[in-house]
Image: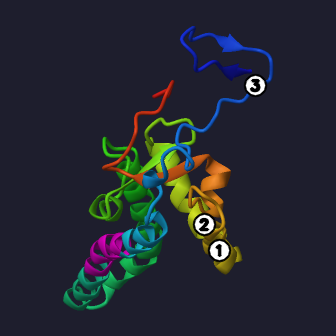
Amino acid sequence: MSYDSGNSGTWRNDGAVQPHAYDPDLHPELFRGVATRRAFAFLIDMVVISVPVILGYVFIALFGVVTLGIGWALFWIAWPASVIWAIVYYGASIGGPSSATVGMRLMDLELRTWYGAPGYFVLGATHAVLFWVTVSFLSPFVVLVGLFNARRRLLHDFVLGTVVINNTVRVPAQGARTW
């Protein structure tokens, strides 16, 4: 069943698929420079994620010295806490009002679903996890996919049904659902 994006607002049962909200042929400015700025946004986000993690490791090291080694037992919790921090960062950022991480906002990018709705927490967290999983197994392929499609979508974007667009030139999507 698919949602009819026309004026009737009814459900359709004819197997039709709703078209993409952002068409690169009609609005090429939405995707101009996205691949390059997305790479820089990733680097900025890595700095934002790394600073608290590094500060946490320094704190644990100093705490271990003060407690004569007992505090170093906290190092076993540092790696899982780092992973949780990164997932929460991506989920909260993409699930926030701007649908973008700090790096994406600085690079003027925004994540949207293929039908035009803004991101939400679970989508942001899943986006991050799926990105790291695909990069771990298919590193060059994940990036190369973005060079050969008009929307500059990476492999995990295809799987999740998301698209990254330029924020300042965003055109309101026709019939976008926000739930």
Residue 70 against residue 176 in the figure, above or below:
below
Residue 70: x, y in percent? 32, 84
Q: Nearer the viewer, residue 20 or 1?
A: 20
Could you classify mark 1 by the number of other residues whose Cα lies within 10 Å: few (under 14), some (14-19), or many (20 or more)? some
Mark 2–mark 1 CB contact (< 8 Å): yes
- Which of the numbered marks, if any, corresponds to residue 118? none
Q: Secondary structure at mark 3?
A: loop
Q: Quadrant of residue 102?
A: bottom left
User: Type of residue at label 3?
Assistant: Ala
Please identify the residue farthest to the right as the structure is shown.
14
Q: Which residue is mark 2?
A: 146
Residue 163 against residue 34 in the figure, above or below:
above
Determine the residue positioned at 35% across, 52% down. Answer: 93
Q: Secondary structure at mark 1?
A: helix
The span from disc 2 to disc 3 (Cα, nearest Å) is: 27 Å
Please identify the residue farthest to the left as the structure is shown.
66
Say whether disc 2 or disc 3 marks the residue closer to the N-terminus: 3
Residue 122: x, y in percent? 50, 44
Q: Which residue is mark 1?
A: 144
Mark 2–mark 3 CB contact (< 8 Å): no
Assess whether residue 51 is covered by the magenta stretch: yes
User: Type of residue at label 1?
Assistant: Leu
- Which of the numbered marks, if any, corresponds to residue 16? 3
Q: Nearer the viewer, residue 164 or 68?
A: 164
> From the viewer's perspective, is 127 left or right of 82?
right
What is the magenta segment's predominant secondary structure? helix
Determine the residue positioned at 35% across, 48% down. Answer: 169
Q: Secondary structure at mark 2?
A: helix
Q: What stretch of residues is rendered in magenta?
A: 44-55
Say whether disc 1 or disc 3 marks the residue closer to the N-terminus: 3
Residue 34: x, y in percent? 45, 63
> From the viewer's perspective, is 133 left or right of 103?
right
